[in-house]
Image: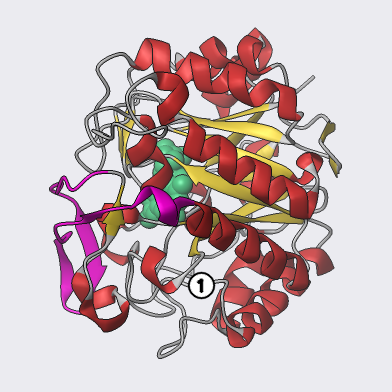
Amino acid sequence: MSKLFSPIRIGAIDLSHRVVLAPLTRMRAALPGNAPNDLMATYYGQRASEGGLLITEATFISATGNGGYASPGIVTDAQVAGWRKVVDAVHAKGASIMLQLWHVGRQSHVDLQPNGQAPVAPSAIQADVRALLPGGPATGSMPREIELSEIPGLVGEYRRAAERAKEAGFDGVEIHGANGYLIDQFLQDNSNRREDAYGGSVENRARFLLDVVEGVKSVWGSDRVGVRVGPGNRFGGMGDSAPEVTFPYVARALAPFGLAYLHVIEPRVTGNVSDDDKPPVAAGLLRPLFGGPVIAAGGFDGAGAESILEKGDADLVAFGRHFLANPDFPERLRRSLPLNAYDRTTFYYGGDKGYADYPVYES
Ligand SMILES: Cc1cc2nc3c(=O)[nH]c(=O)nc-3n(C[C@H](O)[C@H](O)[C@H](O)COP(=O)(O)O)c2cc1C
């Protein structure tokens, strides 16, 4: 009996299978305005299946949090209306959808910032990261250190975005704490040199994430909030002197919130490239500490997914590259059908090509 295709309840959400669409930035929002368009509604609708779970692409919570010129936001009325169409298309197929809340911190660029200002970060440390600009990827700009007095305002931006996600009809939100974005910049010590209550000890470095969880929970209730972390993740010039301390601390600190799930990217993945020969290690380490449902992600195929569920190291598995290339991915897994290959050249930018034009399986 397949574990992947057995039902599960995560927080307040009932699912009939455990094949999750991983959050995938695709840079297809309408410009100007960064609102989700009809093509995005088609794309997400294609990937929805009865009782399945989709997580949206990273979606900026404020103009200063954006890292991709054609990424969608959840700030303006037009963005909320665009997301409403996406949500409706997904719900029409009987699936649930969470919005991924995103602030990129230092992974932005002055060209993406209001008034060309410097992006904000826990510390003024520039990283060799690529912001996605109209002309192509460019190194992120030198950030400005966030003032202590600005932190409640930033947390408020997450809370406001969570409210707007509710207006758009989502089933919940996922807080993006991975891949070297703002929350991860606080968590890992090579990007956080602060000497106040938000830097130094792991307790202090995790404080921003926990403040955000508290804020978002006040909008949704904890059973409709998930958190994504990337232990040992180096994407975006990241690094931590003791990831084996930092991330277990985070999992334990999140436990009392009773969240819908913890979403763990395996360290074998860096950004969108993975060394699939390495076994998964992080989900299994954090799951007993977190004590709630864990979604594992990074380098999984059907067999790898069954195996981690079978071992009890995860409860669900999120798929990125395979799912973007196979709109009917859960069905293909269930029936062991061959997969479409993904085209890396159309991951970001562009329109329909390599986006909503991947075919479903036809016998
Ligand atoms: C095109 C692309 C865009 C991505 N965008 C995001 C994103 O917006 N948010 C996020 O948390 N992870 C993002 N990721 C990482 C994926 O969610 C996932 O962790 C990664 O692809 C590894 O899973 P896979 O081996 O199944 O592809 C992206 C990956 C790819 C390939």
Looking at the image, is 254 positioned above or below residue 38?
above
| Residue 320 seen in this snapshot | no
Q: Nearer the viewer, residue 303 or 162?
A: 162
Please report the residue visible at 37 percent of the width from the left and 19 percent of the height from the top: 201
User: How far from the left and from the top, in percent, is residue 14?
Assistant: 86, 41
Looking at the image, is 18 positioned above or below residue 27?
above
Quadrant location of the C terminus in the rendered image = bottom right
Would you name the residue on which mark 1 appears?
A: 73
Residue 85 covered by magenta stretch: no
User: How far from the left and from the top, in percent, is residue 355?
Assistant: 45, 69
* Residue 218 appears left or right of 9: left
Looking at the image, is 80 positioned above or below residue 205?
below
| Residue 174 seen in this snapshot | yes
Quadrant location of the N terminus in the rendered image = top right
Displayed quadrant of residue 196: top left
The kind of residue on which mark 1 rests is Gly
Label 1 element class: loop
Looking at the image, is 58 positioned above or below residue 271?
below
Please report the residue visible at 67 percent of the width from the left and 13 percent of the height from the top: 310
Ligand 1 closer than 8 Å to the CB at disc 1? no
Q: Nearer the viewer, residue 305 or 110?
A: 110
* Residue 126 appears left or right of 265: left
User: How far from the left and from the top, in percent, is residue 303?
Assistant: 55, 23
* Residue 168 appears left or right of 70: right
Residue 142 covered by magenta stretch: yes
Residue stretch in magenta: 123-151
Please report the residue visible at 32 percent of the width from the left and 52 percent of the height from the top: 146
Please report the residue visible at 80 percent of the width from the left and 40 percent of the height from the top: 223
Q: Nearer the viewer, residue 7 or 211?
A: 211
